Image (cartoon, rainbow, N blue to C red):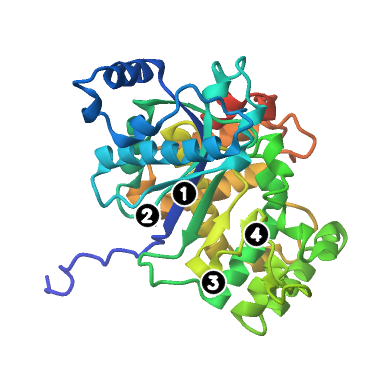
Amino acid sequence: MSSSSARPAPTRKGPSPLFGIEIEIFVKVKDRVQAKVLHKLASRGERASVPEHWQKWDFDLSNNSKVLAKKEAQRLVVGQAIEAAIKKALGDKHGWTCEPDASLKERDLDDRKPKDGRKYWGIEIISPPMSSKKHWQVDIKRIFEAVEKQFDLWTNECCACHVHVSPGPKQKDKYTLADLVKVANGAFLWEQALQGLLPPARRTNRYAEPNHTVFATAEYKAVQTKGWEPVFRKIFAAAKNGEMSLVGAMTQTSLDATTGELQANRYLSTSFHPYFRLGTIELRRQAGVASATAAIHRVLLALTLHVSALDYSYNNALKRKDHPTTGELVTELSRCNKLLPATCHGADFGRWLRKCADDYSGSPVVLRLRGGTSSGGGGGGGGQPSRDSRR
């Protein structure tokens, strides 16, 4: 046998995207943690050993207080406490941050749901850029384990989980113009199918509107008579003058006549808004999470949509005069999950997709699955925040 024939076959290079996750969530200090901290604060001998964030924490402050300055200060302390918990789990150079998020409408919580709702504070936990090739699932699990040791978590329809994606495997690796066109194509092609994987509150949401509401609207509405070619042609035409032109079209960037500054729409399902600042495309459509498993599934949905966008043969859809079904999307994303590194496997992603499709099939906006109507349905929707968020 020749030496050349004895060489191992080269490893196929598959997609290895980078991503970042932003988790909007409500947190409350666990009762036992609060009791322990208050006991130490009351002890002259132990008070000095209490971390600074606990010393600053106002345990009597209600989130419906009229004193805005106190609430703003409290949210900063909440972020410090979360970051301290993460540091203990991951070490000094973890890169995760925690920011206050008053947009989460703490005032809408009450003491019935969740219990002690007036003690919850809205925050956003933000990851650093993470590699799909590394053990990112382990890190996310460690983050939640660390936070849940000290805090109760809650999420509702106000909360979202945003995932930023870039091609990777290195941060310097950027989307090409051709890539951006494909991502835009995918956002339009799979729009209705994606709705079948989302709770009702996330299908039409002012902070994550479908992309066709601001661009190629007429072409999208005419798919059932003219097919997908006019939609893809419109996207391609927007890209003829380069990245700035395409991103401007996808974000409806315009010059503000009053301020003279560029204004862009960031509140779209597949948002191109962070592209020039971060080099990422952001999926904003998904519901909030209150568990590591749910966060991992949110990441995988964004990563597989990314892989599909760059790998899909859009020529096969040009003459099609219907919208792909949720069942087709489940099959496509399950395929794309297998193309990702092994570190993206083992999370029962395919089963989760099928369960989402089953649970949300009762809504009229969810199209029939290929081969028949999805069984089950009525899977909670927006009225079951704790159930939705933990999937």
Tell me: residue 246, above or below residue 113.
below
Can I make out residue 309 in this image? yes
Mark 3 or mark 2, earlier in chain: 2
Quadrant of res 372: top right
Q: Amino acid at mark 3?
A: Phe
Which residue matches tag 2?
A: 130
Type of the residue with mark 4: Arg
Q: Does label 3 or label 4 sit earlier along the sequence?
A: 4
- The image quadrant where one finds the N terminus is bottom left
Say which residue appears at 61% left-offset and 28% top-offset: 65
Q: Earlier in the sequence, mark 2 or mark 4?
A: 2
Q: Are marks 3 and 4 in contact (CB under 8 Å)?
A: no
2 and 1 marks in contact (CB < 8 Å): yes
Mark 1 and mark 4 residues within 8 Å of each other at the beta carbon: no
- Tell me which label, 1 or 4, sits earlier in the chain: 1
The circle drawn on residue 141 is: none
Number of residues whose C-alpha sits closer than 10 Å to that of mark 3, classed few (under 14), some (14–19) or many (20 or more): few
Mark 1: few, some, or many residues within 10 Å (few <14, many ≥20)? Answer: many
Whole-angstrom CA distance, mark 3 to mark 2, is 19 Å
Q: Count neighbours of disc 2 (C-alpha within 10 A) and say few if under 14, some if 14 to 19, many if 20 or more.
A: many
- Residues under labels 2 and 4: Cα distance? 22 Å
Instruction: Give the distance between the C-alpha atoms of the residues marked 1 and 4, in whole angstroms.
Output: 16 Å
Element type where label 3 sits in the image:
helix
Q: In the image shown, does 34 or 24 lie closer to the viewer?
A: 34
Residue 341: x, y in percent?
A: 36, 53
Q: Which residue is mark 3?
A: 276
Write down the quadrant of residue 204 in the picture.
Answer: top right
Closest to the observer, 383 or 95: 95
Secondary element under disc 1, as helix, strand or loop, is strand
Report how many numbered discs are placed on residues in the image. Answer: 4
Label annotation for residue 21 = 1
